[in-house]
Image (spheres, coloured by chain):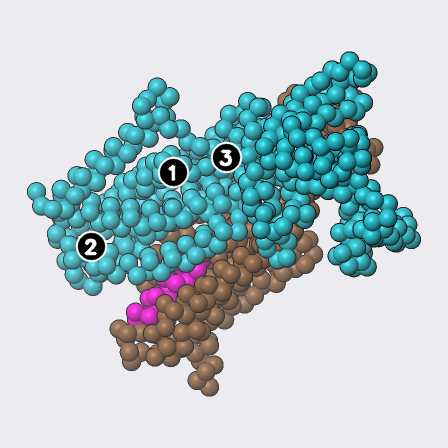
Chain colours: A cyan, B brown
Amino acid sequence: MDKTRISAVILLLAGVLVGFFIYNSQSSDSYFYRPFKFGLDLSGGSRLTYVADVSKLDPANVPDAMSSLREVIERRVNVFGVSEPVVQVERSAISGMDQNRLIVELPGVTNVDEAVKMISETPNLEFRVERASTSPKRQAIVAAREEVQEFISALPTTTPATEAEIMLQERFDEETLALIQQDPDFESTGLTGRYLKRAQVNFSQNALGPSILVEFNNEGSKLFAELTKQNINKSIGIFLDETLLSAPVVREEISDGQAEISGQFTVQEAKELTRDLNLGALPVPISLASTQIVGATLGEEAAQKGLEAGLIGLFVVAIFMIVWYRLPGLISVVALTFYIVLMLALFKLFPVTLTAAGIAGFILTIGIAVDANILIFERMKEEIAAGKGLLESIKEGFARAWLSIRDSNLSSLISAAILFWFGTSMIKGFALTLMIGILVSMFTAITVTRTLLLALGFRNRVGIAKFLFDSAFFK
Amino acid sequence: MTIVKYRKIFFVFSAVLLVVSALAIGFYGLNLGTDFTGGTLLEIKYPSGRPDLTVVQEAVKKLDLGNVLVQPTGDKSYTLKLKNITEVEKNSLFESLTLGGESFFTSERLSDIGPTLGQELRNKGLIAVTLVIVLIIIYIAFVFRQVSKHYVKSWKYGVTAIIALAHDIIISAGAMALAGHFLGGEADALFLTALLTILGLSINDTIVVFDRIRENLHRHPNVKFEEVVGISIRETYERSINTTIVIVVTLVALLLFGPTSTYFFALIMLVGMVAGTYSSIFIASNLLVSWEKLGRK
């Protein structure tokens, strides 16, 4: 056996092995168990996109705040008992819109009301100190508020909110707009729910309802001690989601890191609040920007149909190639099978999340994979027509088609890379399968086809070889 | 070579297609999806058969949710397209869709995209298309830098390829406008994906023909440019057509048997691929010939 035959056998064996891996990895009893990972549009589930309001943070602290936001949300989502939830942070800075986003994917959850409540209606606990009525800052805030209020009331009542927003931004400078966001009576201290160690419901004997006892962590205790020390005989406002709950007056420095929040809670409210506080308060406020929900049946149907379309497409392509190019066509179908097996294995190993768009991309790459073979076979035909021997024609065909294949696939790669860079998750899935597909198909269509074709050992175009290599309508 | 000789006929044919596409886009516009505009998309399924369209429309109209577009989808479903709604509005919408508690339905898909996300995708899309085009011009000019010695400067290959691309993109967009008007297809993020993929694939065919022109310019240094182009087209068209057949087959399979969510994607890709093969055989190289002739006068 010569070298090409040995490589051909090795290749075929490798292909069968990979195929065996894929088959085996589908069954959950197997040691190799590695199921395909389906995107939400195929498995059903929901995807929530939140925008984080980081306007009050120093830009340098934003990445930290976002990652702790992600951790907090992850904790909350985990309480939910969803299998494999995905919580990720995304930053978008394109054409002037700088947004920090948080994306929550909940596979299998199609009733998101509860999830949305759990995630976003979270307590934003903050301790603030009283501002003296004579403080210049307080006066500036009050003045700014009055000015803006006057402007707004002068607008026609029919003005849409978005338009009013733009008009405000044109009319007032940034400083004024920042001022009106602040509370004239209380000043932020930076002591927030972030520094909480634990919260618990407390029933004190001399109060009507339950109160909430919060315990700060080390850092928080220090902050709280400092805060109480400097504000003796002043009141500290305890805010929950921008609402003042209570404003107890400080009598002395509190150094044990404990505070009691009394408000008009029902027992139920107090319980929920402590639960949420314990799960962690959000370091930055977030708002829901988009919800996408796909029902499980719709997803299943899409996956099923995608598979069917792929198989039918593959079948017709195979028939076409064999009828048109005969033996080389058959070899290219073997190479194509190789391609599909390799791609499926990559999908499992990476793992690549399969979406409807991704499957469409995969089906499309079947066409691209075959294209390289068509280029090569056409070249081979030309070489044969020019009177060269079969073996030489095969070799020349591959060598000469290479430039065209490289040039054309590179341009597709450029498009795919850009798609990947700009895309939403759905488009990313498509672009990724397209990129991997182009690269893998170059290997299978060129290396695999060449090795197998040469291994067959046809040298001259006589007898059966003439029939096998002459393509339809060969002139 | 006939294709080169009768190039004016092909130019006219393309011009007609382009005008029709431009008119379709101008008159009907693209039916932009909520991906781009922001808004709510709801697909509901009535398992025991859907009620009449007018009944659903009436029920929704009472709610004062602005303009709500109701479209039949599949056999038992409706797709509703409306502005962004609040939780309360959503609940009352769901309530009214049961038609007084008489018709049970399931919510198959709900997508509520905020306006800023939509706007961002729109901007990103424009940037992406521009970037692909610029990179492809640079790429072609680079790959073909050595052909400048013969007849036509290399950048002209790039420009011609881009004209062919514009041709494909305009026709695809025209098809989308028609599909949007007559079939209710939405130009969503997948449409943008289709356009960018068409950009990448249709340039393939053009590059293969140009590649051959480059090679033949070396091989036949004393032959007239238009004849070299003619030879090159003759040598490559079988490959171009076969490749297109293969890709068309896979796309038709996707169109007929694939998931509904990629239906219009497959349709637009199909139009784009056919237009792309046509333009690389009949338009791109012929434009080079015309350009070269113009330069000689």
Residue A352 locus on image (x, y percent) = 42, 38
Tell me: A346 left or right of A399.
right
Dominant SS of magenta comes to helix
- Quadrant where the C terminus of chain A is found in the figure: bottom left
Looking at the rendered structure, the kind of residue marked 3 is: Gly
Magenta residues span B202-216
Residue located 65% across and 24% down the image: A199
Task: Judge if badges 1 and 2 mark residues of a common chain.
Answer: yes
Q: Residue furthest bottom?
A: B297
Q: Nearer the viewer, residue B182 or B192?
A: B192
Task: Judge if badges 3 and 2 mark residues of a common chain.
Answer: yes
Sequence-first tag of 3 and 2: 3
Q: Secondary structure at mark 3?
A: loop
Residue located 30% across and 69% down the image: B215
Residue, disc 2: A394
Q: Quadrant of residue A380?
A: bottom left
Q: Nearer the viewer, residue A423 or A339?
A: A423
Residue, disc 1: A350
Q: CA distance from mark 3 to mark 2?
A: 43 Å
As drawn, A275 above or below B200: above
